[in-house]
Amino acid sequence: MDGSISVSGDARQLITDLIIDYAHAIDDDRLESWADFFTDDCSYRIINRENHDKGRVVGIMDCSSKGMLQDRILALREANVFEPHTYRHIVSGTRIVGQDGDVFSVETSFLVVRIMQEGDMAIFCTGKYIDEVAVTGGTARFRSRLVVCDSNRIDTLIVIPI
Amino acid sequence: MATDIKNLVTWPDDGVSRIPIQIYTDPDIYTEEQQRIFRGPIWSFVGMADEIAKPGDYQTTYIGDTPVIVLRDLEGDVQVIVNRCAHRGNLVCIAKEGHTEELTCVYHNWRYDLQGNLKSVAFGKGVGKQGGMPDDFKREDNGMQRLKCEVYAGLVFATFSEEVAPLTEWLGAEMVENIDRVVGRGMVLLGTYSQYMPNNWKLYMENVRDSYHASILHMFQATFRINRLSMKGGIKLSDGGWHHISYSIAETDKEESEYDSKKLRAVKDGYTLADPSLVKGWREFDCGTTLAIQSTYPNFVVQQISNSLALRLCLPKGPEECELLWWVFGTPEDTEEQREIRIKQSNMIGPGGVISMEDGVVGGWIQRGTKRDQDKSTIVQMGGRDIAPSAEGRATEVSIRGFWQGYRDCMGV
């Protein structure tokens, strides 16, 4: 059976705190801190489940460095044009499924509601985070975060990270 | 039965340079479009031949809003068949893709071969000599509807029309040349996704053909100093205006004080990318083309943005919604490094594309902005009022006028 592994309470707490703090930072529009949740050498990708299952590589966002994460946010603030909106992340069911030294393989379900400025609310995206979390010196950071969206469809556009 | 289209809409004066807003919302016009355009004298892109590589492979998609099956029959030929059982109209293929030796309707087990011929009808002779189909029911007259199709450079096109010219003739030499250039080396599919938009399909297709907005709406390039309106480039329109290519060619980009002095909103100084590898590319084409957006009438797009290659198909989903399907691809000859570059550049396109995401939203804003002004029209007069071939430069709306020429030709308005 593919399932959770035994992990010390300290590491588990650091990992779940990281995942929850990340969601709050995005929902609170503290996007400039987004890159800080990642290690210096990191990746962040959003891909749909169909592509992921078929082993296809191109998705909706593909940041392979911390600089690219920062550029995404700078573009969002200074360049991209979109209707103001916020997210509410509901994350649940975090499980730790593997460990290699200080790096833990973690999976978490998510649901993101998008709230438009005029008040329209709708489920924007559901899916699963597949993370590699590095735990060192009492801190946890994402070495990689793969966002696998259940649906192939994105409504209108995606500019705020998930 | 045919509706007199002229009773539905009155086209403004000024030819194809003013567009009646009503045609973006009117359900009757939407219905007429399905008949006169999507079942009219056009070739619709329906998929990649490589995606149905083996006999029996199939995919389901749409022409306009008609569901169709694209498959490879047991002889190895590509077929496009309307996804509708001849019996009660049920969808025959439910899955998005799969493999089958025959087409069987789950409702009453009517069975067809992979060319749509009806092979058997469950209980056709009744049960215990009771019931069954009439003696004069002929299977050969009751197959699924098979469409004319052609495969070119791995792209599958189909048509409802008996009159339309063969595909390459319909496209014209200039359009075929660009398809050869971008697609002709073969395609390796890197990813697919869909972008659902709250606007009429034509608003998206106008946006695709609108080279005027590119450096204005899309601030990413200007903010980070990547693209310039003054790059050498231009527009190619097919005879009659139906198909278009908007292109630019690198290494001719010169500083133009005029551009800066206009103080376009898009021009901001002082920003640089922390990781400029996002826009690093290689000179893929000998002709030096760095961007070519091609649309074939009415709703198919072949895209080259630097080394980012993609196909797009804009499917109408009712008068005020549409779905944009994307196929992102590379070529069989790509090196590992080139593949990585294509993946990185995919950040520029699609619903999350730093360059193109705005294309997903402007259509919905127009839809909302015009909701109560159905009697008004929009203006498409940048660069003239006709579809005369453009001089150099992309500050023109001539390609949009070409779209409307095709629209008026098909719709009879």
Image (tube, helix red, strand yellow):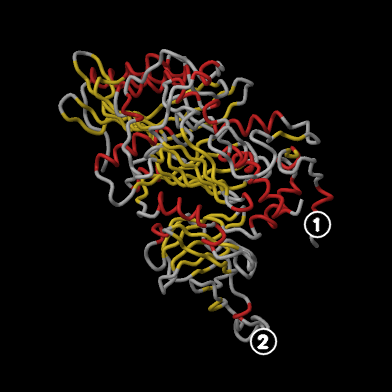
Residue B76 in percent (x, y) is at: 40, 71
Which residue appears at 34% of the width and 34% of the height?
Answer: B344
Q: Quadrant of the N terminus of chain B?
A: bottom right
**B190 on left or right of B103:** left
- Asked if badge 2 and badge 1 are on a common chain, one would say yes
Q: Quarter of the image holding residue A14?
A: top left
Q: Which amino acid, by three-letter code, is at mark 1? A: Thr
Q: Which amino acid, by three-letter code, is at mark 2? A: Asp
Is any part of residue A20 visible from this angle?
yes
Question: Which residue occupies the foreground of this view, A160 or B216?
Answer: B216
Give the structural element (helix, strand or loop) at label 1.
Answer: loop
Label 1 environment density (alpha carbons within 10 Å; few <14, some 14–19, many ≥20) = few
Residue B102 in percent (x, y) is at: 47, 71
Of labels 2 and 1, earlier in sequence is: 1
Question: Which residue occupies the foreground of this view, B263 or A33?
Answer: B263
Q: Quarter of the image holding residue B321?
A: top right
Is any part of residue A162 visible from this angle?
no
> Disc 2 marks which residue?
B135
Q: CA distance from mark 2 to mark 1?
A: 38 Å
> Disc 1 marks which residue?
B3
Q: Residue furthest right?
A: B7
Q: Which label was assigned to residue B147?
A: none
Q: Nearer the viewer, mark 2 or mark 1?
A: 1
**Chain on which label 2 sits:** B
Give the structural element (helix, strand or loop) at label 2.
Answer: loop
